[in-house]
C-alpha cells in the first residue's frame, strides 16, 4: 500500500515515515502542499491513503482536501493538526478529510486510524491474498506455497519481496511494465536506478528456487512482468 505523507516538520515527518515503512507501506513524504499536489496529479489513483498536515507551506492540507474532492477523488485522507478545537475539526471534515488526529499523538493511534481508513476504502487488500497455489500472508510476512509437485512450505520474505509479490498478485495475468512497478513500489526519494526492478525479480526468483518453488512471475520481453496462476 502506498501513502502520501505531507508534513513540513522534518523530525515528525521522518518519524512517521520510518514507522510506516516498518509496516510495509511505501511512503512518499513531501514537505509542502504544492509538491503534494504534483504527486497526486502524477499518481492520482495509486495511493491508498493520504496524510495531510493542516498547516503547510504553499497549499494547506485543508486546500488539498478541497481540491481532491472537487476532482471527485475518493482517496481517504487523515488530517494532522495542532488545531484541536471543535470548529477546526468540523472545518477539516467539511473540506473532505475522513479522519482527524490532533498533535501531539502516539504512533500507535496513527496506525490504528490508518487501519480504520483502509477498512472503509475500496482499495483495501485482504490480510491474506490467495492466487492459485500461492498465499501471501501479511501478518507473518511470508509466502505460503501449496504446489501439487511439492509439500506445502512457508517462504519468509523481505519487505520489498513482499511488496513486489503483493502488487503482482493483485493484478494476476496482467502485464505490468517495470517502470510502473518501480513507480509504485519505490518511494520518490530513492535514487531512480533503471534496473532496480529486474534486479529485485532476479533475487525473488533465486529465493523461490532455493525452496524448489516454481516461480509464478513471468517476464514478457519488452513489456514487463505478470503473475501467472499456477496449479
Image (cartoon, helix red, strand yellow):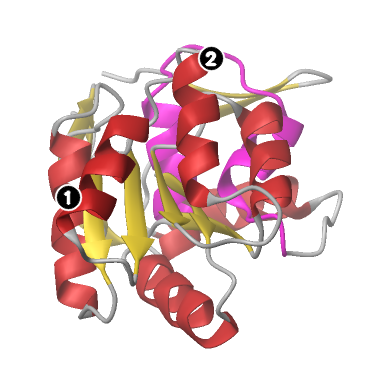
For label 1, count other residues whose C-alpha is less than 10 Å away and answer few (under 14), some (14-19) or many (20+). some
List the residue tagged with mark 2.
Answer: 71
Q: Secondary structure at mark 2?
A: loop
Q: Specify whether 160 is left or right of 181.
A: left
Hey, which residue is sitting farthest bottom in the picture? 11
Residue 108 in the image, given as x and y percentages of width and height:
16, 74
Q: Is residue 124 above or below residue 113?
A: above
Residue 185 magenta-highlighted: yes
List the residue tagged with mark 1.
Answer: 115
- Residue drawn at (40%, 56%) of the image: 25
Q: Specify whether 11 is left or right of 159.
A: right
Residue 210 magenta-highlighted: no
Instruction: Tell me the quarter of the picture where residue 192 sits.
Output: bottom right
**CA gap, disc 1 to disc 2?**
25 Å
Q: Which residues are magenta?
A: 161-189
Q: Nearer the viewer, residue 19 or 9?
A: 9
Residue 225 in the image, given as x and y percentages of width and height:
63, 26
Q: Nearer the viewer, mark 1 or mark 2?
A: 2
- Residue drawn at (28%, 32%) of the image: 94
Instruction: Tell me the quarter of the picture where residue 39 sits.
Output: top right
- Residue drawn at (25%, 21%) of the image: 122
Q: Nearer the viewer, residue 124 or 71?
A: 71
Which of the image's four quarters has the N terminus?
Answer: top left
Q: Specify whether 221 is left or right of 212.
A: right
Amino acid at each position: 500500500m502506498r501513502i502520501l505523507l505531507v508534513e513540513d516538520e522534518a523530525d515528525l515527518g521522518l518519524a512517521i515515515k520510518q514507522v510506516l515503512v516498518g509496516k510495509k507501506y511505501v511512503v512518499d513524504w513531501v514537505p509542502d502542499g504544492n509538491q503534494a499536489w504534483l504527486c497526486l496529479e502524477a499518481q492520482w489513483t495509486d495511493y491508498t491513503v493520504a496524510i495531510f498536515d493542516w498547516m503547510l507551506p504553499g497549499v494547506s492540507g485543508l486546500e488539498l482536501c478541497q481540491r481532491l474532492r472537487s476532482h471527485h477523488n475518493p482517496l481517504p485522507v487523515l488530517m494532522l493538526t495542532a488545531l484541536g478545537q471543535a470548529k477546526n475539526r468540523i472545518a477539516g471534515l467539511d473540506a473532505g478529510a475522513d479522519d482527524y488526529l490532533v498533535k501531539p499523538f502516539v504512533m500507535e493511534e496513527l496506525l490504528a486510524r490508518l487501519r480504520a481508513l483502509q477498512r472503509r476504502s475500496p482499495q483495501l487488500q485482504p490480510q491474506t491474498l490467495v492466487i492459485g497455489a500461492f498465499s501471501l500472508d501479511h501478518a507473518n510476512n511470508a509466502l505460503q506455497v501449496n504446489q501439487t509437485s511439492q509439500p506445502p512450505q512457508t517462504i519468509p520474505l523481505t519487505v520489498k519481496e513482499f511488496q513486489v509479490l503483493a502488487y503482482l498478485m493483485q493484478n494476476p495475468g496482467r502485464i505490468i511494465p517495470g517502470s510502473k512497478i518501480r513507480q509504485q513500489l519505490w518511494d520518490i526519494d530513492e535514487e531512480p536506478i533503471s534496473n532496480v526492478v529486474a534486479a529485485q525479480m532476479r533475487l525473488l526468483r533465486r529465493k523461490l528456487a532455493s525452496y524448489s518453488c516454481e516461480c509464478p512471475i513471468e517476464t514478457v520481453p519488452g513489456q514487463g512482468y505478470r503473475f501467472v496462476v499456477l496449479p
